[in-house]
């Protein structure tokens, strides 16, 4: 499971958890509260998906084509910025969220989405 130990994945996951703890403690730093989860979402979700693909195909060299990250950004944007805000006041549509989804996907593509050595398990 070397993919799941990538520093970008671990860092994103830890920052996400820390942000959630801060929010539960009613500590709201505006920029973090509004956009950090959106930035970290793609590295976390896409790394888990990449790990599943590598395990399924038994191919540690497997990588996602960039279009997969684009599709993930589009799907998350539709779900969280269009659909959910239309049905619940708990969700707020914010175009900047899509920018942060895109930045997170770019971070994933540039850092995590690299082939692993065939001798090492994903």
Image: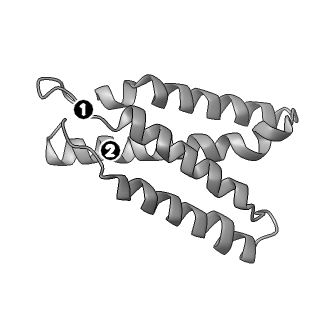
Q: Which sits in the foreground, 22 or 31?
A: 31
- Counting every numbered tag in the picture gives 2
Mark 1 and mark 2 lie on one chain; the one further toward the N terminus is: 2
Q: Which residue is mark 1?
A: 122
- Identify the residue shown where x is 19% and y is 35%: 60
Q: Which residue is mark 2?
A: 50
Residue 87 % position (x, y)? 73, 76
Q: Quadrant of residue 51?
A: top left
Residue 77 % position (x, y)? 59, 64
Q: CA distance from mark 1 to mark 2?
A: 9 Å
Residue 103 % position (x, y)? 56, 45
In this image, 101 relative to 29: left or right?
Answer: left
Q: Quadrant of residue 90?
A: bottom right
Residue 75's place in the image compared with 101, above or below, is below
Q: Residue 56: which disc?
A: none
- Identify the residue shown where x is 44% and y is 39%: 108
Q: Which sits in the foreground, 88 or 66?
A: 66
In this image, 13 relative to 65: left or right?
Answer: right
């Amino acid at each position: 499971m070397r993919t799941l130990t990538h520093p970008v994945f671990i860092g994103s996951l830890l920052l996400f958890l820390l942000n959630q703890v801060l929010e539960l403690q009613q500590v709201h730093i505006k920029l973090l509260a509004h956009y950090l989860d959106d930035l970290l979402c793609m590295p976390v979700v896409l790394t888990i998906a990449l790990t599943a693909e590598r395990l399924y195909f038994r191919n540690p060299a497997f990588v996602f084509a960039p279009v997969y990250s684009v599709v993930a950004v589009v799907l998350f944007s539709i779900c969280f910025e269009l659909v959910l805000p239309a049905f619940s006041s708990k969700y707020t549509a914010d175009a900047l969220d899509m920018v942060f989804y895109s930045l997170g996907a770019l971070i994933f593509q540039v850092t995590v989405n690299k082939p692993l050595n065939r001798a090492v398990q994903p």
